[in-house]
Image (spheres, rainbow, N blue to C red):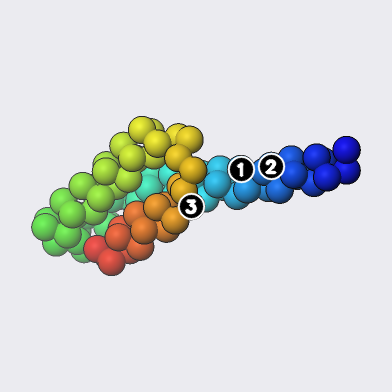
Amino acid sequence: MLAEAEKYKEEDEAEASRIQAKNGLESYAYSLRNTLGDEKVEEKLDAGDKEKLKKAIDETVEWLDNNTTATKVGSIILIQYKTMLTIL
């Protein structure tokens, strides 16, 4: 019985970590989207860079929406996050 509880504890922790990573990226993507709408930011960004960011944000949000239960979501989220950062 104790072993079973430990097994579920590990599964619960893994799921909580996955959800936290997903929520963090989703929050970051929407925050970036809102920031791009700020007039002060718009003035400072090159139109090409702004389009690249919008595309990366849209692709990230779409991916998150379509992969809500992906088992390796943590690693993929990190890749998506790094991709968005390299554009900046």
Question: Which residue is the site of mark 2?
Answer: 12
The amino acid beneath tag 3 is Gly
Give the spatial CA distance, label 1 vs label 2. Answer: 5 Å
- Which of 67/32 is in front? 67
The residue under the point 24% across, 63% down is 87
- Which of 44/68 is in front? 68
Q: Residues within 10 Å of mark 1 (few under 14, many from 20)?
A: some
Q: Disc 1 on helix, strand or loop?
A: helix
The percent position of residue 79, horizontal first and vertical second, equals 36, 58
The amino acid beneath tag 2 is Asp
Horizontal placement of 9 versus 63: left or right?
Answer: right
The amino acid beneath tag 1 is Glu
Question: Which residue is the site of mark 3?
Answer: 74
Give the spatial CA distance, label 3 vs label 1. Answer: 10 Å
Label 2 near label 1: C-beta < 8 Å? yes
Whichever of labels 2 and 3 marks the residue nearer the N terminus, that label is 2
The percent position of residue 65, horizontal first and vertical second, equals 38, 33
Give the spatial CA distance, label 2 vs label 3. Answer: 15 Å
Horizontal placement of 61 versus 5: left or right?
Answer: left
